[in-house]
Image (cartoon, grey):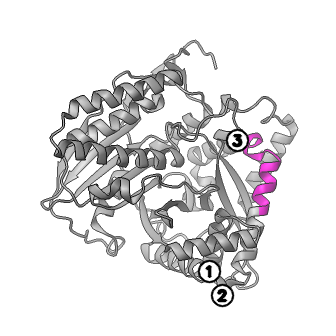
Amino acid sequence: MDNGVSSAKCRPLGTTEANWCRALDDGTGTCITGILLAKSIGVAPIQASLSLILAAQPLLRVQIVEKQGQLCFEIDDNVLLDIEIINQEALQPVENIDRRDQEPWLQIVEDEMNTTFPQQKPFRVIEARLYRFPNTDNLIIVKLHPAAADHLSAVGISSQFMKHLQDFVIAEENGEDLQELIDRRMNVELEKGLKTGEEVPPCVEDAIPPGKASKPFWARGIDVLGYGLSAFRHAILPLENVVDDRKSRIIIADFSESATNKMLRMCESKSSDLNGLLIAASLRAVAKFKGTGSRGEHYASVILLNCRSMLEPVIPDSTAGFYHSAILKTLHATETEPVLNLAKRVTNDLNEAVKNRKHFTDMGDLNMLMVQAMGRPALTPSASMRTALVANMRDVPCHAADKESTSYLNLRDWVTCSSINGVGPCLALYPDFRYGCLRVSFVYCSPLFSAETVHKLVDDISSMLNNLDDQL
């Protein structure tokens, strides 16, 4: 991409990245990680840990700037990130009917997720805050711009961060010269960065192998028309409040190691995968909630694929950036179909779409539809900007931080997810593996949907996944 502003340290945003900038203005895409520690720590170890990550990730050092009327990524050589410190009252539940059952620390994560990046350019694509409480609890917030980091990036960054943080906290408490250790580690990370090319990585569109995204002009027109017409038959969750301001809310479901292993075994035995199972359970739960019986409804599902290994050149999974592609599928679901049968259909449909290169050929079409939904909300049900029932990741990321590498931090909990209160699905799933167990963070838009409604759905989804023997 050469538009007169490209250089080793600056390039225009790709179409997908630019769309995420626009979506973020409406409230969708703020990628947040909240890490709760039962330990009092200083700012220096946090700053040092993030500096190491920035040194190794050129795209996390960029600022979004405007040049010649184009949004661009421009690398900032400064790897030092300012950490805002917020001295907080004791963790107290918010008196809000939509948040009454939620842990107080998660309410802060939600508030941060619903606070977007600056509108005035230039601005950095990463922000960090430290919430300090009267006891020894500390809450670390790391916020990432969606144009610079997809969900896989965010999970990987949080894992690296926690490992670095433990090392620096131990060193500081042992009386080591923290600055010397930082400098030594920084030199190693900078050398790695220089070896991989100290330049902005390409956007996903520029890294698609030649010919893989090609299709005839007439076929593109037919596909766009088909997506538009299909939207009229897609059912969604009943809308409850389309008037008041919208916020993204989080509900978390944790599964034991035995339940997680059973899910994986059942998926393998039924020629399905975990993405198919999570989508199927979600569709079944909605069909049951709406009482569709055996009649069922057609639902739109968005599945995000990590394309890094399919690009040219191949981009390592450890590289930050937005390298996901979406596939939009229409699925008919009833409340009577066994969830494992539905999961197999979901998996087979997705595999066929990938085989036909839909993740590349339809990338531009779905970007255009996303822009249309943002620019003309009236095209969506009750101007809700809900474009699908559910969205999920095809490949579930795994946190690399194990208990040993984080035990000294007294890590109580952490979560990584993104906001959807602008354009987006009714329910966004952010699954990950941690310590051998599956966790799914469900994000929904309030007050379009109430906490009571989504809790019912999540409870039903969890029940299905924990009792798969009953679903045969």
Query: On screen, 413 above or below 80?
Result: below
Which residue is nearer to you in this view: 229 or 42? 42
Q: CA distance from mark 3 to mark 1?
A: 32 Å
**Residues rendered magenta in the picture:** 348-363
Residue at disc 1, secondary structure: helix
Disc 2 designates what residue? 470
- Compared to residue 281, the image places residue 24 above or below, namely above
Q: Quadrant of the C terminus?
A: bottom right
Figure check: 144 above or below 246: above
Residue topped by disc 3: 363
Q: CA distance from mark 2 to mark 3?
A: 38 Å
Q: Amino acid at mark 1?
A: Lys
Between 375 and 388, the one lying in front of the other is 388
Which sits earlier in the primary sequence, circle 2 or circle 3?
A: 3
Question: x and y percent of residue 450 in the render?
Answer: 45, 72
For the residues labelled 1 and 2, say whether their Cβ atoms are less than 8 Å apart. Answer: no
Nearest the eye: 334 or 238: 334
Residue 227 spot, x, y in % from top left: 75, 52
> Label 1 belongs to which residue?
290
Residue shown at 49%/74% (left/top)? 256
Q: CA distance from mark 1 to mark 2?
A: 21 Å
At x 52%, y 55%, the residue is: 398
| Among the two numbered marks 1 and 2 on one chain, the one whose residue lies closer to the N terminus | 1
Closer mark to the observer between disc 3 and disc 1: 3
Q: Can see residue 99? A: yes
Q: Are marks 2 and 3 in contact (CB under 8 Å)?
A: no
The image shows residue 129 at horizontal and vertical percentages of 27, 45
Mark 3: which amino acid? Answer: Met
Q: Residue at x 26, y 42 (%)?
A: 168
Q: Quadrant of residue 278?
A: bottom right
Q: Nearer the viewer, mark 1 or mark 2?
A: 2
